[in-house]
Amino acid sequence: MDIVNVTGPLPPQGHNPEGLWLVGCGNMAGAMVEGWRSAATDLSQAVAIRPSGTPVPGVRTVRTVAKAGPPPGIALLGFKPQKLPEVAPELAAAIGGETIVLSMLAGVEVETLRQRLPAAAAIVRVMPNTPVAIRRGVIAVFGEALDQAQRTRVGSLLAPLGYVAWCGSEAELGTIGHVAGSGPAYVARFIAALAAAGEGKGLDPGLALTIARETVLGTAWLAAAGGEPMAEIARRVTSPDGTTQAGLVVLDGELPGLIERVVAAAGRRSAELAADARAIDSSPAHP
Ligand SMILES: NC(=O)c1ccc[n+]([C@@H]2O[C@H](COP(=O)([O-])OP(=O)(O)OC[C@H]3O[C@@H](n4cnc5c(N)ncnc54)[C@H](OP(=O)(O)O)[C@@H]3O)[C@@H](O)[C@H]2O)c1
């Protein structure tokens, strides 16, 4: 006798422990895919789910969760936080009890995700930055009560993409996001400002940009290779009463306070987004 489930969606069939769903694969998840591809990570079990159907190079791409196949070992959420109410119902019905949900939704807390996706084996938040595309990313990770196997599974997926920072709290993950997740935008602005200053002093624009970019890259590389304190790296190019010293007097008067305000502003916006996500959950319209 055929058994037909007439009361709701059919339960997920089977389970693919090696499976990886990329639920939304735009800029950030796309950058992670680039990193995995350049690390020769096996993506044969990965499926990108994007409503536009825009192909993701090297990854099977479908438009809907329903077409993605059996529940995967890991479902990486890569859509915008505002899309959670729209995506969650279908996803909640499709993932299995062995699926680890890896969410990169900025500001959306574990508790909110747990309410939306109650069947998930574990909820893990990640906060990557865009240099994951070249395997030099920073990826903050926080998981609720992960067992060792889950931690190893998540860690080995992320390790090819750069520096993985396991966090002890969501607050720590948030702060790393405000420093490293947003950081490429701040560093890009610094490079552009250094280049503009050179251009303002008569340098060719292309040359000014190249030397500003290479200076930041070279200094970061020097710091990473030698492990010296930043103060020492600065001291080695600063003669007492010399030209760099004159520049630093101006910079040191402004930069620390400015960057502190920048990071604080990102933190305030993140708190607003988290409050919005919680408000949607507790609204009467939400079942
Ligand atoms: N950008 C960053 O530096 C950064 C850093 C850390 C975390 N994040 C987080 O990463 C997430 C994505 O940001 P992004 O900059 O990559 O955004 P994005 O480029 O706009 O990509 C969003 C993706 O979501 C997909 N999408 C839209 N509606 C969907 C639905 N109903 N079901 C499934 N997928 C859907 C889009 O599909 P189509 O491709 O078909 O349009 C697209 O692939 C956000 O939650 C953000 O907070 C971003």
Image (cartoon, rainbow, N blue to C red):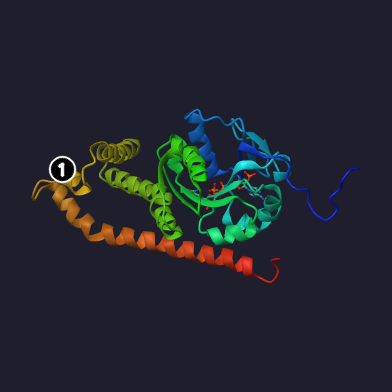
Outermost residue to the top: 40
Front residue of this view, candidates 244 and 224: 224
Quarter assignment of residue 252: bottom left
* 126 on left or right of 199: right
Q: Quadrant of the C terminus?
A: bottom right
Mark 1, other Cα within 10 Å: few <14 / some 14–19 / many ≥20: few
Q: Residue furthest bottom?
A: 284
Q: Position of residue 88 (x, y in %)?
A: 66, 55
Q: Position of residue 67 (x, y in %)?
A: 73, 40
User: Nearest the camera: 22 or 119?
Assistant: 119
* Residue positioned most to the right: 1
Image quadrant in which the N terminus is located: top right
Q: From the viewer's perspective, is 253 left or right of 33?
A: left
> Is the C-beta of the residue carrying label 1 under 8 Å from the nearest atom of ligand 1?
no
- At 49% from the left and 49% from the top, the residue drawn is 126
Residue 31 percent across, percent down from the top left: 50, 39
Residue highlighted by disc 1: 237
Q: Secondary structure at mark 1?
A: loop
In the rendered structure, which amino acid carries the disc numbered 1?
Answer: Val
